[in-house]
Amino acid sequence: MTHLLSPLLTVTLAVAICMVTMVGFSSAEEPESDKPERLLRHVVVFKFKEDASEEDIKKVEEAFRALPKEIKEIHNFEWGTNNSPEMLNKGFTHCFLVTFASEKDRDAYLPHPEHEKFVAILRPHLEDAFVVDYWSSK
């Protein structure tokens, strides 16, 4: 079967879908002074191995959702599963958005012992992942 989109374009579209779905749009009526300063967004998207059970995936979800309680540098956290009708996710099913106030906070998060514990839970079930970090803009 011929692929209509390059892998890079497909991944770019998947990231855009996650960001639009999870971040949403600002209200035009929201006063400028009420908008937060720029925030560092850390988008993480997972494709699980075919043999990962629903229970395995649930453990990964629960472990990731627990991180904001354990790591003070996490400013905000959202997650969801793919529900796009476009069928362009290439098997990536879970999208997590971790928000930090600074690069220093993100840099403290990555080697944090609780993050490392999460990675140990994730690793046996993960087929692939991609990560995109960006500064939000008003």
Image (spheres, rainbow, N blue to C red):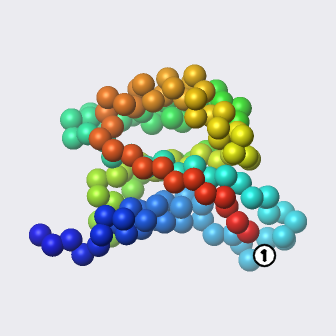
Residue at horizontal 60 percent and vertical 65 percent from the top: 24
Q: On the rendered structure, is 1 left or right of 119?
A: left
Residue 69, image x, y percentages? 65, 30
Element marked by disc 1? loop
Q: Residue furthest left?
A: 1
Residue 59 visible: no
Residue at horizontal 21 percent and vertical 41 percent from the top: 50
**Up/down of 43 relative to 33, above or below:** above
Residue 77, image x, y percentages? 61, 45
Q: On the rendered structure, is 78 left or right of 31?
A: left
Residue at horizontal 79 percent and vertical 70 percent from the top: 30
**Up/down of 40 relative to 86, above or below:** above
**The C terminus sits in image quarter:** bottom right
Residue at horizontal 49 percent and vertical 23 percent from the top: 117
Most foreground residue, 11 or 55: 11
Residue 64 visible: yes
Residue 70, image x, y percentages? 64, 27
**The N terminus sits in image quarter:** bottom left
The picture quadrant where one finds residue 11 is bottom left
Most foreground residue, 73 or 110: 110
Q: Residue furthest right?
A: 33
Query: Looking at the image, how many numbered discs can be counted on the residues?
Result: 1
Q: On the rendered structure, is 69 left or right of 132?
A: right
User: Callout 1, which amino acid?
Assistant: Glu
Name the residue that disc number 1 marks. 29
Residue 55, image x, y percentages? 32, 30
Most foreground residue, 104 or 45: 104
